Amino acid sequence: MQKARYQGHATALSFGISSNGNSQVAVTFEIAHPDEHHGESITWIGHFTDKTAERTIESLQHAGWQGDDLSELDGLDEAGVRAALPEMVELVCEPEEYTPDNGPVEWILRVRWVNKPGAGRFAFKEPLTGQGLKAFAAQMRNTVRSVRGGGAHRSSNGSAERGGYEQRNPPPSGRATSHPNAPGNRNDVPY
């Protein structure tokens, strides 16, 4: 059992109260990810505390909920849940230790986050898109072609220089390569 991300659709939903007296929602998702878990179900439990209520509601909205009255989600059958929460979501799952009543410790896969597909990934503070990306791509075109063709010397701005390959000095100490991590001549060991 390991950390994983799955895509899924909501199939069941219910509300309850935790042992701490906090309101909760449990949403069961059917895994739609094309792997060995396709068709299996996993349940996410969202909490409505002062710190977590907004993120729980956001998760329901990622699943497609458009309303503002949580009670409209109560008592829905599978078709009703699929209609109220129609969007595919990405479930971020992690293993968690669980101790059932009077039982031995078990490991379960727990849904930690319900996200929009592709969300929760790395995001640049300043994304390169649109015309800026097109200009950068044009600037890099010769470098890309050079790398694809076997490599030519590139100037500091990333564009390939005209005129072929640069003549390089032979590596020091008779080494076969000048790479800083390449093995050296065994006669130059400092001990």
Image (cartoon, helix red, strand yellow):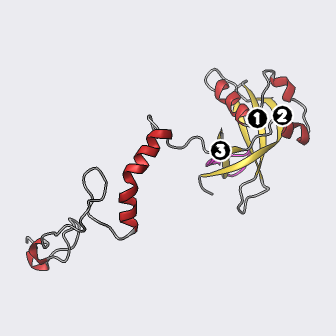
- The numbered mark at residue 84 is 2
Mark-to-mark CA distance, 1 and 2:
7 Å
Residue 129 shows up from this direction: no
Q: Amino acid at mark 2?
A: Ala
Q: Position of residue 110 (x, y in %)?
A: 67, 46
- Identified at 64% across, 47% down, the residue is 93
- Identified at 67% across, 45% down, the residue is 91
- Stretch of the chain drawn in magenta: 91-105
Q: Is residue 70 above or below residue 38?
A: above
Density class for disc 1 (Cα within 10 Å; few <14, some 14-19, many ≥20) is many
Residue 39 shows up from this direction: yes
In the picture, measured across the screen, residue 162 lies left or right of residue 66, that is: left
Residue 170 highlighted magenta (yes or no): no
Q: Earlier in the sequence, mark 1 or mark 3?
A: 1
- The numbered mark at residue 13 is none
Q: Position of residue 171 (x, y in %)?
A: 14, 72
- Identified at 75% across, 53% down, the residue is 32
Whether label 1 touches label 2, CB < 8 Å:
yes
Density class for disc 2 (Cα within 10 Å; few <14, some 14-19, many ≥20) is many
Q: Position of residue 144 (x, y in %)?
A: 39, 60
Quarter of the picture containing the C terminus is bottom left
Q: Position of residue 24 (x, y in %)?
A: 74, 29
Q: Amino acid at mark 3?
A: Pro
Q: Is residue 11 above or below residue 141?
A: above
In the picture, measured across the screen, residue 186 lies left or right of residue 151, that is: left
Density class for disc 3 (Cα within 10 Å; few <14, some 14-19, many ≥20) is some
Query: Image quarter for residue 176?
Result: bottom left
Q: Which residue is mark 3?
A: 117
Q: Which residue is mark 1?
A: 64
Q: Nearer the viewer, residue 10 or 41?
A: 10
Q: Nearer the viewer, residue 112 or 17?
A: 112
In the orientation shown, which residue stands out farthest toward the front? 163
